[in-house]
Amino acid sequence: MRRPPLLTTSLPAAFAALFTLTTISCSRSGAEQQPVMPPVAVRVIPAVTADVPLEIAAIGNVEAISTVDVKARITAPVLKVLFSEGQ
């Protein structure tokens, strides 16, 4: 079976062109022309463990996402409340 003449002549030419373009684009002389960027200056400080106060200054209303009812599960009266409001 014979190959078409276009395929036998154009395929090697395409490979040759691809090889030439690859060789030219990967040459070492192109890398030398690109400017080298200097390193970026950064400041470094040591990490310190400390308490950070939580302060929120805002104007508006605050509403809880969810609420719960605290009910005694015994029949005797509650003598002491061991938590404060908002805790």
Image (cartoon, rainbow, N blue to C red):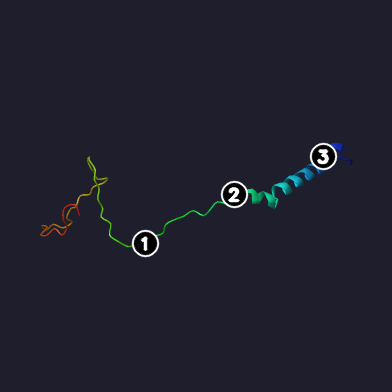
Q: Which residue is mark 1?
A: 47
Looking at the picture, which amino acid does disc 2 mark? Answer: Pro
Q: CA distance from mark 1 to mark 3?
A: 66 Å
Q: Nearer the viewer, residue 48 or 55?
A: 48
Of pointers 3 and 2, the one earlier in the residue sequence:
3
Q: Nearer the viewer, residue 41 or 72?
A: 41
In the image, what residue occupies the spot 36% across and 62% down? 47
User: Gap between marks 1 and 2, in whole Å?
Assistant: 36 Å
Q: Position of residue 28 (x, y in %)?
A: 69, 52
Dot 3 corresponds to which residue? 10
Crowding at dot 3, Cα within 10 Å, few <14 / some 14-19 / many 20+, comes out as few
Sequence-wise, the earlier of marks 1 and 2 is: 2
Q: Nearer the viewer, mark 1 or mark 2?
A: 2
Q: Quadrant of residue 60?
A: top left
- Nearer mark to the viewer, of 3 and 2: 2
Q: Which residue is mark 2?
A: 35
Tell me the distance, in whole angstroms, between the alpha carbons under discs 3 and 2: 39 Å
Q: Amino acid at mark 1?
A: Ala
Q: Nearer the viewer, mark 1 or mark 3?
A: 1
Under circle 1, the secondary element is loop
Q: Could you tell me residue 53's position as x and y percent?
A: 25, 55
Seen at 73% across and 45% down, the residue is 21
